[in-house]
Amino acid sequence: MVKHLRTALILAGLSTQAFADSITYTTIETDPRKYKPTVLSVDLVNCDLYHELSAGYGLKLETVILGRLMPYAGFKGSWYDGASHKVFDDYPEAPGGMSKQFNTDVGATLFLLNSVKERKVRVVLSSYGNSHYRITHFTWIPSQVKRMFGVEGGIFYNRKGIAIKGEGASFYNYKDKATGAEVAMPTSSGSGTGLPAGDATWAFPMTNTVSFYGGIRYRNIKNTVIRAEGYGKRSNANVVDFYADLMLAPVSTIGDVTDKSGKQWEMVQKSGAVNHMGYRVGFSSHCSRTFGFSYYMEFGKRPGPVLGDKFANQGGYLSLGVGFSIGSGLQLNIRKHDGDKSSKKAEKNAQNEDNKEKDDSSSKKD
């Protein structure tokens, strides 16, 4: 038994192997300052676990102004949302039915630190295997890495359909819009005098939350491209971001619901029904050249409706996305004034004179 266990552990350790190879190669690019500063990232698949699971798509556009200011705008929509796809027979729900979740994120990052360092960059030459093992060949290339650090801020808007039930019902009341009478949302028996027609133990309203956020962002840029003998063109060219933000939501509203008979009710938020503070921590990567692979992961606690005491019911979430990026060299720089142009021209003339003197000296020696 021990022998078989030892053999299994050894095989598991050998299931992934990496080999550093010495090869002949030609350098095509190593300067990270030549990365594509304007990028459209497209999430073909986006999964967001926040109160209810949603799956959809995402778009994000970013650019760089004056080399340090990075404005960006993002949109995430869903083609499936856990709450909006539930079958409602007796429960009060948003008038006209539940809408699918979407959110927008508009902000900017000001990079305060911006440096380029000489570093060796790992370039993968080949990687192959099956479900039991994977073998990777790579080489180290003398190159450069660009590192940026700054502060950021923006506005995040989230529209979300939620399912209020059980523990979450204690945070909300029903209010008759016709009479103004208010009644607590029941947690067990769902029918009675003064309650919405049908089963009032569940409610499916839409919520809208506007949050302001601020935090920090670290960016690492590699733009190394080689042509390796026997392998062809290979690269390690990506832009990797790490960010962390605090979030504050001064506004978080919950919509009305319509019961089985068609009567409209207002959902009244009790004390503790809204979480006004939150945070997020994220990681993203996209190609630093014209076209490539992109992905991200983000987790935290969003401001908004509270549905219980557990972390997930308090706004805890996890968001993942995979897709591609399209890059452009378009960016806004400072236009050089005449003094700068004259200085550059003088430097160029002086360099030409030096080269001429060297040529004359070589001719004399001959």
Image: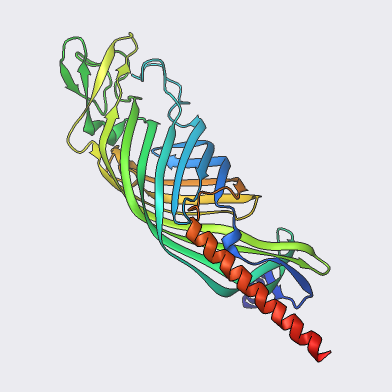
Left or right: residue 46 versus residue 192 is right
Q: In front: 191, or 99? A: 99
Quadrant for residue 40, please give it.
top right
User: How far across and down, in percent of the image, does residue 210 sit?
Assistant: 32, 36
User: How far across and down, in percent of the image, does residue 152 sit?
Assistant: 37, 52
Q: In front: 337, or 288? A: 337
Q: Is 206 above or below relative to 4?
A: above
Name the residue at 26% across, 29% down: 187
Name the residue at 56% across, 42% down: 43
Q: Is 356 above or below relative to 253?
A: below
Instruction: Farthest residue to the bottom: give it.
Output: 365
- Residue 7 visible in this rendered orientation of the protein: no
Name the residue at 33% across, 9% down: 262
User: How far across and down, in percent of the image, does residue 38 sit?
Assistant: 55, 48
- Residue 214 visible in this rendered orientation of the protein: yes
Q: Is 40 above or below relative to 194?
A: below
Q: Is 156 above or below relative to 13?
A: above
Left or right: residue 245 versus residue 329 is left
Q: In front: 164, or 68? A: 68
Q: In front: 330, or 272? A: 330
User: How far across and down, in percent of the image, does residue 266 sit?
Assistant: 24, 19
Where does the C terminus fall, quadrant-wise?
bottom right
Name the residue at 42% across, 62% down: 149
Q: Coloured how?
A: rainbow
